Image (cartoon, rainbow, N blue to C red):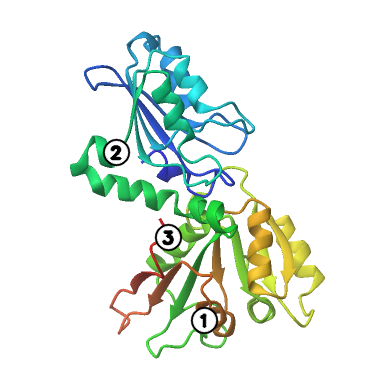
Amino acid sequence: RLAQATIGATAPNPPVGCVVLDAAGRQLASAAHMGAGTAHAEAAALEACRLSGRIDAAHTLVVTLEPCNHHGRTGPCTQAILASPVRQVIFGVADPNPEVAGGGQVRLRKAGLRCEALSDALPDQGHLADQCADLIAPFAKHCREGLPWVTVKEVRDRNGSMIPPPGCKTFSSDASLDHAHLLRRRSDAIMTGVGTVLADAPLLTVRRVDDHPNRRRHLVIMDRSARTPASFLMAAWTRGLDPMVGQDIETSLRELARKGCLSVLVEAGPLLTQAILATDLWDERVLIRQGASATDPDTIDVERRCDRH
């Protein structure tokens, strides 16, 4: 739950939560990684434990992701763990980075700590291990393929059309609009088409739910005909978006990944939506269908293209 609250705020790092327990399994402290350049979850949780005066009782760390054993903007989590009284680490999912995979658990074991994956330590808690894998799926894809996790959002009316009635920008219910803004909140970038820009001048910001503080997102506009107005790009910048214009879908996605984006939300018209769904670049399709009548709720279906973790 700690990690889930930070989805969309930590790129290029994954969302990670950590809980410190004593030898009897009582919770002493907890923390989540809050963003690149800030303390990783393990170091933050151990520091919280120290500040509360209970570090001497620290025995077990339960953490979403295998502790890292390499230097980035901060020191290795293994170093922080070994500088504490902790004797056991249980992690939800192994590090998917092929360059460092396994390094954290190997170092901890060599130092005499018990370090186990959740699926080995508690085989009956497989659903929690799956939730951890889902949490870091965008990070895993970024590590393995150099591409962000791509979610394609489609909204269709009762007749299957994606085009709103004249004079309207949407036909979604309030609940569906809330869900759409949650999808934006968890994303590092938005992708749309120039046709949508010219027809609707969409804001593409998070408004119906609370956003992460001081969050800027990337915006890529697919435009092979150079029709994107400079005024729209400037307005997008002032709204907290870093815009760019792209011509090729995969090239644009790789550029977003290079900039540190883990997740991209596609909010576009039917042509770009279908073009992306025809590739193997997308990972998740969120289909919002208008209710059969004015009194029926919209339906939201989620499809995963494949199991990437």
Cα–Cα span, label 1 and label 3 = 18 Å
Residue 308 badge: 3
Residue on which the image places disc 1: 278
Q: Residues within 10 Å of mark 3 (few under 14, many from 20)?
A: some
Q: Residue at x 31, y 50 (%)?
A: 130
- Element carrying mark 2: helix
Q: Nearer the viewer, residue 82 or 188?
A: 82
Q: Earlier in the sequence, mark 2 or mark 3?
A: 2
Is the C-beta separation of discs 2 and 3 under 8 Å? no
Q: Distance between the residues labelled 1 and 2?
A: 37 Å
Vertical placement of 129 versus 61: above or below?
below
Instruction: State left or right for residue 278 relative to residue 74.
Output: left
**Which residue corresponds to mark 2?**
118
Name the quadrant containing residue 262: bottom right
Q: Which of 301 and 135 is in front in this view?
A: 135
Which circle's residue, 1 or 3, is located before the other in the chain? 1
Relative to 165, residue 281 above or below: above
Q: Which residue is most to the left?
A: 124
Q: Which amino acid does label 1 sit on?
A: Ala
List x then y, in percent, for residue 220.
Answer: 67, 66
